[in-house]
Amino acid sequence: MSHSTTTTGRRSVFSRPTAETGFSSWITTTDHKKIGIMYFFTVLVFFFLGGVESGVIRAQLAQAEQSLVTPEIYNQAFTMHGITMVFLVVMPLSAAFFNYLIPLQIGARDVAFPRLNAFSYWMYLFGGIFLYSSFLLGGAPNGSWVGYAPLSIDSVSNMAFYAVGIQLLGVSSLAAAVNFIVTILNMRAPGMTFMRMPMFIWMSLVTNFLLLFALPIIAVALFMLQFDTVFGAQFFNPATGGDPILWQHLFWLFGHPEVYIMILPAMGIVSEILPVFSRKPLFGYAAVAFAGAAIGFIGFGVWAHHMFTSSIGPVARSAFALSTMFIAVPTGIKIFNWVFTMWGGKLRFTTPMLFSIGFVSMFTIGGLSGVTHSIVPHNAQQHDTYYVVAHFHYVLFGGALFGLIAGIYYWFPKVTGRLMSERLGKAHFWTWLLGFNLTFGPMHMSGLLGQPRRTAVLPGELGGTVELYNLLSSLGLLVLVVSALIFLYNLVVSIKSGVASGPDPWDARTLEWLSASPPKHYNFDVIPTISHRDEFWHRKYAEDEAGRPVAVPAGASEEHGDGHDDRGEHIHMPDPSYWPLVMCLGFFPLAYGLIGPIWPAIIVGVVWIIIGYFGWIIEPVAEGDDDDPVVEDPDAHRSGVAAH
């Protein structure tokens, strides 16, 4: 039963911003699409910085016994490279896709909590700025992205910035995870059951539940590390009875699900792209969905394979060896289903398709090298060598980044209304594939030959073969730089003058292509009613007697009709707001105060945040007028009126 209540509108402390264009419209926006775009371009900046750091690493290791940079600079470079690529590039690039696509793919007009969405972005940006400001304030973190104690509690390790900076980024991710979970569970269009959801939505849901359960673990560990480094607590200091192995347990209990947090969104993306360019539905939809959920669940039970060389004992080693082998099963199910989706299909080798096939191939190689980590003696031989570096780059660069780039090419027309250049896109793909394999392929061999990771100098005694492998890796990075420049050129040129795409350039299958390209502010004129999996495809095609798809004549698709005519409804979209930005600014003095500790800065930060918080909660849903009452609809999630 639908029922409405009427309340008197009230004004905010500050009048709500009204600009729809220009700089102020971006910094106050609560529109999920704009926030997704802001995530994307911020990621590009951090990707550039992470690339510069990888250049420092590869230049230093191109030859044995080289001294281009000091060990201190090298340690900061490889630590910040790891932090940047994990927390400031791959994870937030997935968040860019979540923001832009989740409401569109489920037939909603925005996320459940638009202002919280803006808050998540600003926390991410400020967390990144805070971490990089460490270069100007005494030196960046230099104890590696895994932050192993007791090195990380040493005063010379600069890890106080690490403890606070990752904490800020964790707040951002946790808020976003809650928002996306609520959005998916409550705002799906009528008729969109769980088994009709697009596969990207399935993987988004699993990913955000992983974030919800994994982030509190690292938050606790970081609080303990912060108390050790700043306030002299002794949680991880073995000299005073602390236990550095405790840090490893807490870190990897978060860290291994984190791998799947980074890879599952890419799995969702290629699960959308492969069927479109194979002209077939996804093979084994239910198996792919449940395999993703199984990966998320089992991912929490394999953390100790990172610790086989510590003192965890033979029983624990055996148990975690089995669980690590077992997680290959659902992963293998996904790979087989992607291959069978392409099998017998009418393949179109567009740029998004090529990157998707590259994802499946490179991720399979990374997965197979991962299986070797589950074998305890093998693991002991590989531990802390470049073999491990090769493995996780094949999973996260060859896997996650290939998949995410495929998504950029695929949904670029949806965001801009233009196509990216296919010629430049294919040049990007082939140079990317070559550079990637030239960079990380030789690391398997140099690792097995004994090259240790996290060392500033390639030891001369390892011999000429290992030196050759390192030179090849450094040359491979140059190819990747050229490839990245091709991509950026293609991106800029296509935004300005790409060919107009029309609303459905790929003959796509999912609901976001039902909207205009780029979508209207409120996404859909009419909230669609869902009657099929791959709803948009079924609105375009029927099947003949032989089961072959036949195009439905224009105007004859009412049999699949939306059935939910809301043309008469009043579409109210969330108003922009200053408060997410104002509240996040308070975290700056708090964060810098905590690394001292500097108590006046801490107090200013806390007071600022509290003021921002109360400004936020007393701000009305809309900037009303006493003569123009605000109408609140408790069925907002179904009628398309987004809540705050």
Image (cartoon, grey):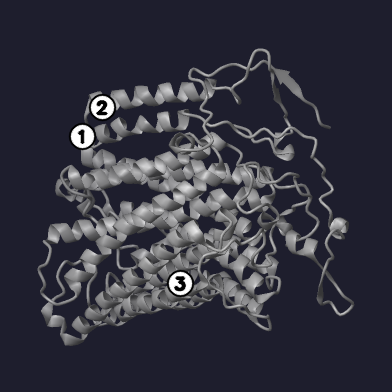
Q: Do callouts 1 and 2 mark residues in contact (Cβ within 8 Å)? A: yes
Question: Can residue 406 be seen in the rendering of this structure?
Answer: yes
User: In the picture provided, is 416 more to the left or to the right than 222?
Assistant: right
Camera-side residue of 144 and 551: 551
Question: Can residue 87 be seen in the rendering of this structure?
Answer: no
Residue 482 point in image, percent of width and height: 33, 71
User: In the picture provided, is 379 more to the left or to the right than 353?
Assistant: left
- The residue tagged 2 is 601
Q: Is residue 264 shown above or below 516? A: below
Compare marks 2 and 3 and give the one earlier in the sequence.
Answer: 3
Residue farthest toward the top in the current orientation of the protein: 626
Compare marks 1 and 2 and give the one earlier in the sequence.
Answer: 1
In which quadrant of the rendered image does the C terminus lie? top right
Q: Nearer the viewer's eye, disc 1 or disc 3?
A: 3
- The residue tagged 1 is 596
Residue 237 point in image, percent of width and height: 21, 48
Q: Nearer the viewer's eye, disc 2 or disc 3?
A: 3
